[in-house]
Amino acid sequence: MPLADDQSILAAVAFSSGAIVAYAVAKWRENTLGAIRDARLRSEVELARREATVEAAELHAQAEAEHQSAARAKAEAAVETLAAGELSRENLRQRDHLVRELQRLAGVTPEQARDLLLDQLREEYGAEAQHLRRGLLDQVEQDIDDEARRTLLAAMQRLTASTTQDATLLSVSLPNEEMKGRLIGREGRNIRTFEQATGATLLIDETPGLAMVSCFDPVRRETARIALERIVKDGRISPGLIEDSVRAAAEEVVKHARRLGRDAVRDLGLPPMDASVEELLGRLHFRLSANQNTLTHSVEVAQLCAMLAAEIGIDPVPAKRAGLLHDLGKAVEAEAGGSHALVGAALLRRLGEDPRVVNAVAAHHREVEAESLYAPLVMIADAASGSRPGARSSTLESYALRVRRLEEVAMSFDGVREAYAFQSGRELRVIIDPVKLDDFAANELARRLRLKVEETLSYQGTVKIVLIREQRFTEEAR
């Protein structure tokens, strides 16, 4: 037993010793490996530090080299700048010397030399500058004309108006020839009473079945026509019945005029106007302007004004009112005095009409200054309505006068050889002397001629001015 115990103890001691030795060996191995790792890490850190130091030294050396190179370049630039300054000063000295020598040889002062140079440049490039100026002005005028024509055509194409003309002579049918004697009456008392009551002249001639009424006042002429028709229809003719028929006819004309004026206002889509204004508008129906019914003309001008206003982007309602009322003064009695434009404007101003409308009415014949766009619109629409083909008729005398005055205006300018008016005065052809006037002067003459025609002549529509400058050189080879 004791021997066995001793063996167990020895085995335990041997195991413990082996474990201690193994632990010591493992610990030693671990310490050794850690030392090796630390040494390797320190070596790597040292190597990296040395490499960084070398790179920093290289960068510093490179920067120092670049700095020295920049310093050398700066020094070279300073030397070149000094040389350039010296060269510039030398050039200035040479230039001053040459200028003085040139002045001495030419015998002119600097101011004279500058004037000579400007004259030479003006001579060399003057024609080109004039050509450029003409081109720019022509282009601007062409653009304006094209835009105005486009706007006007766009409005006119939307309007369809009748161009039939009213007769200027009023006649009344008679049932028989006996009626003529009864209208004249005993010793002419019936016809005298009729003429005194109506203010018109009753013409009874040999024309079978007709009696004619003549009067400068269209309203009185219409009153006389209605009264005469009433008298003929009734068959009873006496001074008292004639006066009663004339009074009834006058009342009927007033009612008819108010109805016509009210219808014109309503048809245009305008609010009702003052009763006196509507009556005056209706009275325009009995008046003619070159055989164009004045009320129809006013309605057409109102429609054109409204459409033109819409085209250019302004309120069409005042434009329509101005176009409708622009000839209102023609229906006012002659005792009012003044032109129809100013008389109509004064009446509308008293009735509280829109100031823009009043000014457009007063200015549509350029008797006052236009204060808004509505006045030019009325001028354009008035001219367009009157110049429509078939809208108005002109006498041979007025045509001859228009042509003659156009030619006289053209011949009043220096350098004009011949002038001819064509197309009822719508076109004026002017032949000028090519020796007296060059191309630029011819263009300027055409402009001045246009301005003088606009200032001195009154016409509807436009006048096309064609200026001809022609020079021919002929040789005959034998």
Image (cartoon, grey):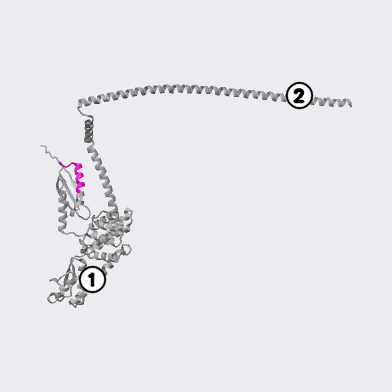
- In the rendered image, residue 457 lying in the magenta stretch gets the answer no
Q: Residue at x 57, y 22 (%)?
A: 50
Magenta stretch contains residue 438: yes
* Residue 189 position within the rendered picture, expressed as x and y whole percent measured from the top left: 14, 75
Q: Is residue 159 visible?
A: no
* Residue at the farthest front position: 350
Q: Amino acid at mark 2?
A: Val
| Quarter of the rendering occupied by the C terminus | top left
Circle 2 crowding by C-alpha within 10 Å: few under 14, some 14–19, many from 20: few
Decide which of 343, 124 is in the foreground and name it: 343
Does the residue at mark 1 contact the one at mark 2 (Cβ under 8 Å)?
no
Q: Helix, strand or loop at disc 2?
A: helix
Q: Which mark is residue 95?
A: none
Magenta segment boundaries in residue numbering:
435-449
Q: Position of residue 199 (x, y in %)?
A: 18, 69
**Residue 21 marker:** 2
For mark 1, what is the residue?
250
Name the front one of labels 1 and 2.
1
> What x and y, as percent, mark residue 141?
26, 47
Q: Is residue 377 above or below residue 470?
A: below
Percent x, y of residue 282: 26, 65
Residue 51 visible in rendering: yes
